[in-house]
Image: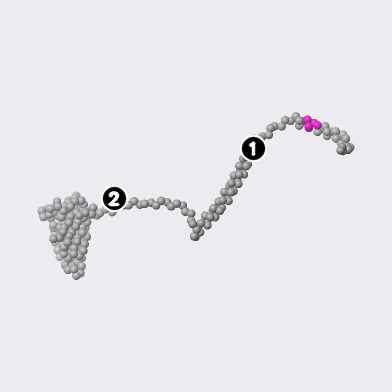
Amino acid sequence: MNHPRTEADTGPGHAETERLRQALAEVAYDITPSPLPLAAVERRGRRIRLRRRTAVLGAGCGLLLVPLAVVLLRGTGSGAARITSPAAPASVSPSPSASSAVPAPTPRIVTPGEHVTAAPGFELWLTAEGKHWTSPPSSPEPQFRSVVDGNIDRSTPGVSVQEESEDGRVYLSGLYYGGKGTASSVEVETVAGTVRGKLIELPGDPGWGVWYAITDVKPGKGPFRFRTQATVYDTEGGIYAQLRSR
């Protein structure tokens, strides 16, 4: 059905509009459009999709971590199982070797004529000839036991005993000689028990030395008498020399 034309459609203005429309159409027909950048569009689309997927995964991991944190916090409460890291391996201290053990005692080295005070009035000193000593006031004069007069065989292990007593106290001393190794300690076995003493020697490994000890007489035991044995031990715990009573 054709619409009747109005005056506006047939007037001078309408003709001018038609000429402009035709001119624009001719110009548009002469323009060749450039090809669409489809590859670039596809790459950009893939990047956008990848970023969205990463964001979704990150949000999902965060949601998973929240329950895990809650479980860990609850596990720290009383009665709950605790999550602990593996314990470090226990360090085992090596057993002390022979070199790290406390060394055995050795004799005190004294110079010739040097006095050693074992107790008030009981002094000992050594010379190359032998043992010298004084006892408490009842025997104030120095006494002497030779190691060069032939009365002892210094090539054979041996121990001698000298004994004095004063006011309930007993003073013991003697020579030791001829043993192998290094002398270390002395024990005197008596009817009243074991008495332990000390050793002194001259420098230069003379092959002999002097031991001394002090003990008290126990009430009701009668006069002290040496009745059993005196033993000098070496630094290895063996017997350096020994005297047995007869």
Q: Where is residue 243 in the image (x, y as percent from the top left)?
A: 16, 58
Side of 148 relative to 28 (left or right) = left
In the depicted view, which residue is nearer to us: 227 or 223?
227
In the depicted view, which residue is nearer to us: 216 or 87?
87
Give above or below for 60 relative to 132. Answer: above
User: Residue at position x 39%, y 52% from top?
Assistant: 90
Q: Where is residue 38 in the image (x, y as percent from the top left)?
A: 66, 35
| Residue 42: image tag | 1
Name the colour scheme. Answer: one colour
Instruction: Please report the bounds of the magenta region as a residue range.
Output: 22-27
User: Residue at position x 18%, y 68% from top?
Assistant: 221
Q: What residue type is labelled 1?
A: Glu
View extreme (top): residue: 30
In the depicted view, which residue is nearer to us: 72 or 134?
72
Q: Decide which of tag 1 and tag 2 comes sooner along the chain.
A: 1
Looking at the rendered structure, the number of numbered marks drawn on it comes to 2
Q: Where is residue 245 in the image (x, y as percent from the top left)?
A: 15, 60
Q: For numbered disc 2, what is the local secondary structure?
A: loop
Residue named by callout 2: 99
> Can residue 160 be seen?
yes
